[in-house]
Image (cartoon, rainbow, N blue to C red):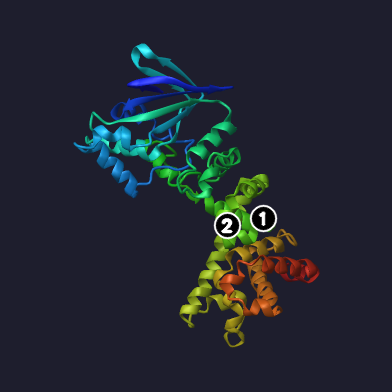
Amino acid sequence: MKLTYKNMANSYAGENIESSVGVVNAAKLVESVKDELSVVFDENIRLYESDSKVNEGIYKTASGNDTSGMFYYYNNGITFICDDYKNSPNNNTLFMKGASIVNGCQTVTTLARAYDDSRLRDDADLLVRVIKIKKYSERAKITKYLNSQTQIKESYFIANHPIVRDLQEDLLKDNYYLERQTNELSHKQKYDSEYLKGKELQVLKLSDVIQRYTGYYVDKYAHIAKSGKGALFENDNIEEILGEINAAKVIKSLETYETISGVITSYRRMRRNSEKNDFLHYLGVKKEEFIFNEYLFVNTTDILLLNTVHKLSELDEEAEINTLIKVGILIIRDVIKSNDGYKQTPPATLMKRKAVYESVRKYIEENQVSLKKLIQ
């Protein structure tokens, strides 16, 4: 990538790392990256947020007659990270290899929009920092810390994790597109019309993938997947969660969750209209035998039931999914009925309690023989 600047000076350097800091004209910057907008933010942790008031402010400042000249002073600037760069002072040009903008996506994309609208004024300049480093783990740390001063979802910080990148590629083989960054697919297709053209893809949010995978496979954190999935992305937790993740497991957890969601929807439909009996037919229970209060937990049991289904599937890998779900619902019902504390706890709260997850798993462990017969 070739970046034309107004001035550029060598800055801090260390072992296997160098940096330069300078000023570039906003229009020249857009012209430098315009053909790379589909990939230049690949190492950023989030993409353009079109409904942001901050971005509208950037647009107005860069296009306003009385504000564009102050853009340098009003804006925080942007940061490139790259494998290598060479400076050509005679031509005021910096040549970068493997360049990515890791801080400043909102600024650059907004400036590009103003440029396309012929509203970007010639006197709008901004600060640019360029960091040369090849070590991937250090690049990821730089990206994280550059973005840690603003309120950002914890899930964004694993966007560049090597395991997540590999998972994205593997899921694509099965026509799932894992969005490491919010709206990643639409962003790439906006600036590269040929990107995955003609492929029918199911788009997955990274936070949902981690939540459902954890709820299904990772007993230790399953209750957290329900009580506050943001905590799953804390450093120690996420490293453990990612330890054995793969595309096949992700797909299994997602498909199971989707089936469970359909069952919960049929229950909610029955709650709204007692004539809707799909849930009763699903369970194989007669209407006159159904005790409504014993099934209130179903409304919010998605993750607990997901974890329960996995534990049951370990008893019989060939068992049919709907059988596992039905048995799982009955197990959770019986575990709640047998514990006075559980019965007195509001279902929405109970479904977040670690203790009830452990009680259900204990029940399955203690009743393996009878449960195997039930699900066969």
Spot occupied by residue 212 in the image (x, y as percentages of width and height): 58, 56
Instruction: Assign a secondary structure to mark 2.
Output: helix
Instruction: Residue 255: give its label.
Output: 2
Q: Name the image quarter holding residue 243.
A: top right
Check the image and name the residue furthest to the top.
90
Residue sitting at x 37%, y 23%: 3
Spot occupied by residue 246 in the image (x, y as percentages of width and height): 63, 45
Q: Is residue 360 above or below residue 244?
A: below
Kindly identify the amino acid type of the residue bearing the numbered disc 2.
Glu
Q: Quadrant of the N terminus?
A: top left
Foreground: 26 or 10?
A: 10
One can see residue 116 in this view: no
Q: Is residue 321 above or below residue 109?
A: below
Instruction: Residue 329: give its label.
Output: none
Residue sitting at x 66%, y 72%: 332
Residue carrying label 1: 217
In the picture, measured across the screen, residue 309 lies left or right of residue 281, that is right
Kindly identify the amino acid type of the residue bearing the numbered disc 1.
Tyr
**Within 10 Å of the Cα at label 2, are there few (<14), some (14-19), or many (20+) other Cα atoms?**
some
Foreground: 40 or 250?
A: 40
Spot occupied by residue 179 in the image (x, y as percentages of width and height): 49, 45
Q: Name the image quarter holding residue 329.
A: bottom right
Q: Quadrant of the C terminus?
A: bottom right
Foreground: 105 or 19?
A: 19
